[in-house]
Every structure is written in structure tokens, then in C-alpha cells.
Amino acid sequence: MASQITLSILGCYAAAPGTFKNPTAQVVDIRNHLFLVDCGEGTQVALRQNRIKFSRIKHIFISHLHGDHFYGLMGVISTFSLLKRSAALTIYGPKGIKELCLLQLKLSQAYTSYPLHFHEITTKEPTVLFEDDRVIVSTIPLKHRIYTNGFLFQEKLGERRLDINACLQLDIDSAYYAKIKQGGDVTLDDGRLIANADLSFDPEPAKSYAYCSDTAYSQKIITYIKQATALYHEATFLDSHEHLCKPTGHSTAAQAAQIAAKAEVGQLILGHFSTRYASLKGFIEEASPIFANVHLADDGKVFTF
Amino acid sequence: MASQITLSILGCYAAAPGTFKNPTAQVVDIRNHLFLVDCGEGTQVALRQNRIKFSRIKHIFISHLHGDHFYGLMGVISTFSLLKRSAALTIYGPKGIKELCLLQLKLSQAYTSYPLHFHEITTKEPTVLFEDDRVIVSTIPLKHRIYTNGFLFQEKLGERRLDINACLQLDIDSAYYAKIKQGGDVTLDDGRLIANADLSFDPEPAKSYAYCSDTAYSQKIITYIKQATALYHEATFLDSHEHLCKPTGHSTAAQAAQIAAKAEVGQLILGHFSTRYASLKGFIEEASPIFANVHLADDGKVFTF
């Protein structure tokens, strides 16, 4: 079965003075890892509403230290303790996040029931934050008012898939199957060399997901996210408010679509909408002429790719 | 018209690992002041749901630095800025709260659009935090795992009320009315002295509201809140879990009722319920034999007294 990445949107709205929509948080389910990405106020409630199993979250990635992306973090850290969690939790985020979390714990005279690790980020080039035999997570340097990183979640290429019919026809000893999956050729007992390509299929293509929020339009991003399976790119504004992009460090839907088109990604998911817009229709209308496969995030939506 | 105090419960549940009820926050409307008391995660959403006018809140009182009482504070501070507030805001809370809030603002490279003041509390005896010509707010030292204060909101005694019929019968010059309301006697033109008591009624009795959360049972509280019009006292546990009170620094419903009875308050409102109880009926059943006029807090309830 082909692997798939599941993206659960817990919140996708910009800091909201007027009405209340959930601020940014999302869960990326990739190769059996559950990564929490950003953690606005109320994230622990949204996690419950979306029936995400808390104990499966072992890594939290914080893009930047604006409140609408991390004011829910301490609530999550504390609730994990109330649930008597024992598994380690690692928080990845900009420098300062450790001091802030530890100060809050100190003032509460609280400790966590589990090992709490911090991985502070200061790099300005794409950098690997996490890697195991299944996935790599790296930073995507973004262009915002304060130091901000997006995150690229990449599956590693899996093994080649055995062509079982070919193997049986040639009467290949099953003891060779592991070698074939690793790409090896096989020499039969009669001396004939059978090329790996005749015994196996290409591995499932490795999928990837790029999270880019918050950011102004930045050409540099394109090379970092080239041909990602899916891109979540912020689209705070419509064209009518493009003049606000520069002072605020945000993008329009059309700019997000340009990034998606130039990076040749598989699909684009727009989010981080300003709450000034009563309808989100304009975001699709302005993005789709530039990049056709575009979708709108919304609190509670689940994307699979 | 007699003055009244209005208490809006935004959240009244203890830190909640399993289900989600709002953590502690409430709004006290007293003599035209709107005081926000504690500020658990999600308070800004609850304020909107309860249609509380943000701009009327000028003072926030934080009892202690456990997360379920203040993790929503930064969200409120930030949202006030997004709303372009200009009026000053004062935060009263334990030492450390200023460092924490300013660190978060610094890391966000954010500033508030309004003057933000901190009044850090370190006293161990009842201390006046705020006073004007209408109300006094003072601390109620509580007994919890970490440094914690409750708050006593007291109306000041108003002016005497003019007995307008008596004044008209005696043909008192209306220029004396202000003096009469201040308690002064009046000498008529014919030389007769009319005692103030014959020209006015007693002022409306001054009402008061005592907020005591979180706290273990503490005899000391009784003297601090004597004859308060209403007492909100935490009741985290039922009798069946009384053994948990000491290690956690919390109270049972019966203990809260004992405080209410000994302090001779007008009414008792129980809150800060542990979320382990499916029904709250037990809280009334265990408190009411000790103190009859007892009520249960709940998110969204409004009490007037």
C-alpha cells in the first residue's frame, strides 16, 4: 500500500481581534510519526475535538514566537503532565522558547512528568531538525517580521518493491528477496545474472509536505520546497490588501499560488486567512488562475496526499 | 436603586486532563468597574461568548501562577493591542508575572498599543491593591501549593439617601441637599436644628464579594471575608477524595461550606470542580447541610447580588 501523509488542520486563522477562529496549529501524520506544527491558544482543546491521540505526539515544531502560533504551547506541555505522560517530548523553535517555557514552569513550581527537550533554532539556511530511517524534517527559512522558519517533512525513499511473479517464474530462492528489495541483482544456479530491474519495481515515491507560515512572498522558498507533494502556504490577504503585505510580512493568495507554481508542487493549501474577510471565496478565485490545484484550509479539515 | 454586584463565570473547572471545561476566569462588575479575575487558557474566547466588552476591563487580578489560572493572559494582552486599545491596563499578580509577560512580548518583538502596568504582589497579610471613591480591592491570603491570593471586592458605603418628603415638608432649601447626603444637620431660618436622621435614610449597605481559589481549608480566611455578601470558594473535591486536599492544596465542598458558615457570608458559590466528577450534584448535597444558601458555578452562569 502506498504511504500517505495526513494533515489535520486544528486552526488556520491569523490573529483574530474581532471574531474567534482558531489560531494556527496543525498535525502532520507521516510514516507513523505525529508532528504538531505550531500551537496557538486553544490547541489542546482542538486536539481533543479532532480526536488526536496526545501520547503519539513526540515532537512539536514552532515556526515563530508570535502569540497566535505558540500561546497554546504551555497548556499542551502542562496537560501532558496531568495525563502522566512518560514519553519524551521535544520542542523545536526559535531561540528564547526554552527560557520562556522553563520560566513558566519555574513560576508554577511545576515539573513535567516526562523528559522535556528543547531544540532551539537559529540557522538561516535549511537545516535538518529531525531524522530517522523513515522521515527527515528540516527548516524552511521564511521572510517575516521576526525570525521564522517553515518546516519540510519528507519521507525517505522506501525499499524497492518485489516483483513476486517474476521471482516465482525464475524460481528465485526467497532468501534473496531482502537483497532484491535493497536493489541487488541475483545470479541463478545456472550462472545467469538477473538484473534487479527484472525482479522489482521502483519504490513508492517519497512524499513530502512543506509548511510555510508566516511569510511574505520570497523567491528563496521556491528552491527549498521544489516538487513537494503538498504545500501549505499562508495567504493572509487578498489582492485588495496587497499593500499590507510588506509592513506585516504576509502574502496574498496570488503570491502563494506563484510560489506553488514555480516550485511545481503537487497541490497548494492556503491558510492563515485574515479574519477581515467574511467569505474565503476570493482566495480560491485569485489563486486558481495561477495554480489550479489549490485548496482552502479550515479548522477541522483533514487533507490526505 | 440599590447597587448590585454581577459575577460572570467564564470558567470554573480545575486543570482538566480528560475532558475540556474552561479553566478559571471570571468577571466582577461592581460599581461600574469591570474586573477580570484569573485568566485561564481560552479566556479571550469566553469573554466574547459572554459578550463582555473588552474595553471596560482595566484591571486583571491573577490569584497564582498555575497554568489553569493564567495561560490565557498573554492572549488577552495581545488581543487588546490588535483591537488598538489605548486605555491603560493593570495586571495584579504574584512576583514573576511581569518578567514572564515582558519576556513573551520581547520574544514576539511586540509592544502593546496601550500602557501596560504590573502590580506584583508579595504580601502575606490582606493588602489593598486598588481603591477609588467607589470600591476597594484587597488580597485574601490563601493556603495553596504555591503563593496564592484571593481577592475581596468591596463597595464603599455610599451617601445617605435624601428623605425628599421630609425635606419638602420642612421647606428645606435644596442648596442643603448635598450637605444632608453627607450626613449634616440643617438649621432652619427660624433657628430650629433638624437632625440629619430626620432628613435622610441610611445609605444602601455596601456589598462585597470574596474570591477564594485555589486554597486548602484555612481558618484564617474566615476573618478576612467576614459577612461578605457573596463568597466564591473553591471546592475541587467531594468528601470521598478529602485525602487529596492536603497534597494538592485544595478543599472539599463541605470545607468550603464551613468557611461560609463561620464567616457568616450571604451566599456561597462553589467552583473549581475537579473534572473527575460526572455530576456536580454531590457538591450541593455535601455543602448544603452546613451552609444552606449555596450555589454551583458553571461556565456562562451569571450571579447577581
Image (cartoon, coloured by chain):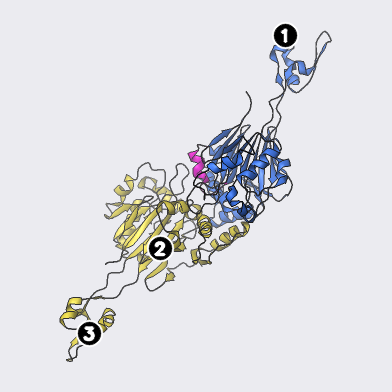
Chain colours: A yellow, B blue
Expressed as whole percent of the image width and height from the top left, the position of residue B302 reads 54, 35
Dot 2 surroundings within 10 Å: few (below 14), some, or many (20 or more)? many
The magenta span reads B39-52
Labelled disc at residue B169: 1
Q: Are marks 3 and 1 on the same chain?
A: no
Residue nearest the observer in this picture, A293 or B278:
B278
- Per the model, the C-alpha gap separating discs 2 and 3 is 38 Å
| Residue type, numbered disc 2 | Leu
Identify the element where label 1 is drawn: helix
Q: Nearer the viewer, residue B273 or B186?
A: B273
Residue A173 — which label? 3
Residue most toward the left?
A169
Task: Check the residue under mark 2 and report the chain it is in.
Answer: A
Q: What residue type is disc 1 on?
A: Gln
Q: Are marks 2 and 1 on the same chain?
A: no
Identify the amino acid type marked 3.
Asp
Q: Which mark is residue A34?
A: 2
Looking at the rendered structure, the number of numbered marks drawn on it comes to: 3
Query: Is residue B76 shown left or right of residue A204?
Result: right
